């Protein structure tokens, strides 16, 4: 009997150790752990601190490097913190659901987030997609909103880059090795949110049927979205900054970028910046601004257009498209790294490249505030160009 008791105790101990080490490995795979669950020296990453509405705080460890199951070496590496969406939902009392999405050859999924305050909009997020869908509380059709930060599926967990917290207007701060997020004070206290009934009249906690209705309402928008996005791939993007206070130069940047916006280059076709943008004359709306002539500054029509050609060239350098002609400025420019600029001059210097890919390539531009962004896409151009020209 004593030997049997010893054997039983040994089995219990062995089972505990197995569960402990499996649990530890799962914590690493999920890249989420309570303080002490993972030694910070073992993995590079960030400490996450959530400041809760009731004045409390919760801490987690976010790994920047996770090995794939059964293998050595990193499965993915991160240069910035990504926050598991479920942590934010649990802390804020939001309802969170994951839904599989099938549409022809598209098999993906989306997370639907419904806040605890029924008067606020919900959000639908797609992994690897820079578009979020805002879900009005009154059941109106969802609105698509472009974001350049994209959520990612990391170890089967949908995680947000910290910039996407701007969707909710939450305050956050990122320092070396530390991410702090302040949940709004008007949210219900965490313990009440966790224990509230799904149909609580006090906090309007969303229920499973609310998530199902939101997902059903989202379907037409998703169908249209994927129909548009199926045959497109972002090849490259580049951004430069200018001074909007320089009115003439800003006008010239706007006009030349507007000429590029939506331009399509079929396979084998050559693209000429001068041919597409055209001559920079006052009759065409171009204004006087600073230009370089023989290494010296001067005033000329179209000053600033070279920033557009340089931004386009910076995007081209990231692709396999064949650059046929490109010239550097006679002196260093402040909007592009050394060796990444491309000057143009009507009738003399051009930026030319050829589409040596098997599909169409098209250009999308965006001006917002002091930033110019140029994107190169492969595939079918949209029938309606996005309204991305904004000068604030």
Image (cartoon, rainbow, N blue to C red):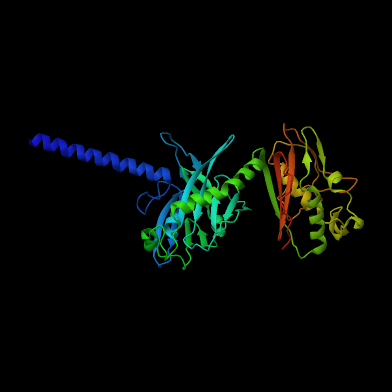
Measured as percent of width and height from the top left, residue 158 is found at 49, 47
Q: Answer yes or no: is residue 331 visible.
A: no
Residue at 71% across, 39% down: 380
Which quadrant: the N terminus? top left
Q: Quadrant of residue 283?
A: bottom right
As displayed, is residue 183 above or below residue 84? Answer: below
Image x and y of residue 36, in percent:
35, 52
Q: Is residue 304 left or right of residue 171?
A: right
Residue 361 vertical position relative to residue 186 in the rendered view, above or below: above
Instruction: Using the rendered view, name the quadrant where residue 66 is placed.
Output: top left
Q: Nearer the viewer, residue 90 or 239?
A: 90
The residue sitting at 60% across, 46% down in the picture is: 220
The number of callouts visible is: 0
Q: Is residue 268 above or below residue 210?
A: above
Depth check: 140 or 312 in front?
140
Left or right: 103 as drawn, with respect to 4: right
Residue 185 image point, x, y percent: 46, 68
The image quarter in which residue 189 lies: bottom left
Residue at 72 percent across and 31 percent down: it is 358
Q: Residue at x 42, y 45 (%)?
A: 30
The spot of residue 156 in percent (x, y) is 46, 42
């Amino acid at each position: 009997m004593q030997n049997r008791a010893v054997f039983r105790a040994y089995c219990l101990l062995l089972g505990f150790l197995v569960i402990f080490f499996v649990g530890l490995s799962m914590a690493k795979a999920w890249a989420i752990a309570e303080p002490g669950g993972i030694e910070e020296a073992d993995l590079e990453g960030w400490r996450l601190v959530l400041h809760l509405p009731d004045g409390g705080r919760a801490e987690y460890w976010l790994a920047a490097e996770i090995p794939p199951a059964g293998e050595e070496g990193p499965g993915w590496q991160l240069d910035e913190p990504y926050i598991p969406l479920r942590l934010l939902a649990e802390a804020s009392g939001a309802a969170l659901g994951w839904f599989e999405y099938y549409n022809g050859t598209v098999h993906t999924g989306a997370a639907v987030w419904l806040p605890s305050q029924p008067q606020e909009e919900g959000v639908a997020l797609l992994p690897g997609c820079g578009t979020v869908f805002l879900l009005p509380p009154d059941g109106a059709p969802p609105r698509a909103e472009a974001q350049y930060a994209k959520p990612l599926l990391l170890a089967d967990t949908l995680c947000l880059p910290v910039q996407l917290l701007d969707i909710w207007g939450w305050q956050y701060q990122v320092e070396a090795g530390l991410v702090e997020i302040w949940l709004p004070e008007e949210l219900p206290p965490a313990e009440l949110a966790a224990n509230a009934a799904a149909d609580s009249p006090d906090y309007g906690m969303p229920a499973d049927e609310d998530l199902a209705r939101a997902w059903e309402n989202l379907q037409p928008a998703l169908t249209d979205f994927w129909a548009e996005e199926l045959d497109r791939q972002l090849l490259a993007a580049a951004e430069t900054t200018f001074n909007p206070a320089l009115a003439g130069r800003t006008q010239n940047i706007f006009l030349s970028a507007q000429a590029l916006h939506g331009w399509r280059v079929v396979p084998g076709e050559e693209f000429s910046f001068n041919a597409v943008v055209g001559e920079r004359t006052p009759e065409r709306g171009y204004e006087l601004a600073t230009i370089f002539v023989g290494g010296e500054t001067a005033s000329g029509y179209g000053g600033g257009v070279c920033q557009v050609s340089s931004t386009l060239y910076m995007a081209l350098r990231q692709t396999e498209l064949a650059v046929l002609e490109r010239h550097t400025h006679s002196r260093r420019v402040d909007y592009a790294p050394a060796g990444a600029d491309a000057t143009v001059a009507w009738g003399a210097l051009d930026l030319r490249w050829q589409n040596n890919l098997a599909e169409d390539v098209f250009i999308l531009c965006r001006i917002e505030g002091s930033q110019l962004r140029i994107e190169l896409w492969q595939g079918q151009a949209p029938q309606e160009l996005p309204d991305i020209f904004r000068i604030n």
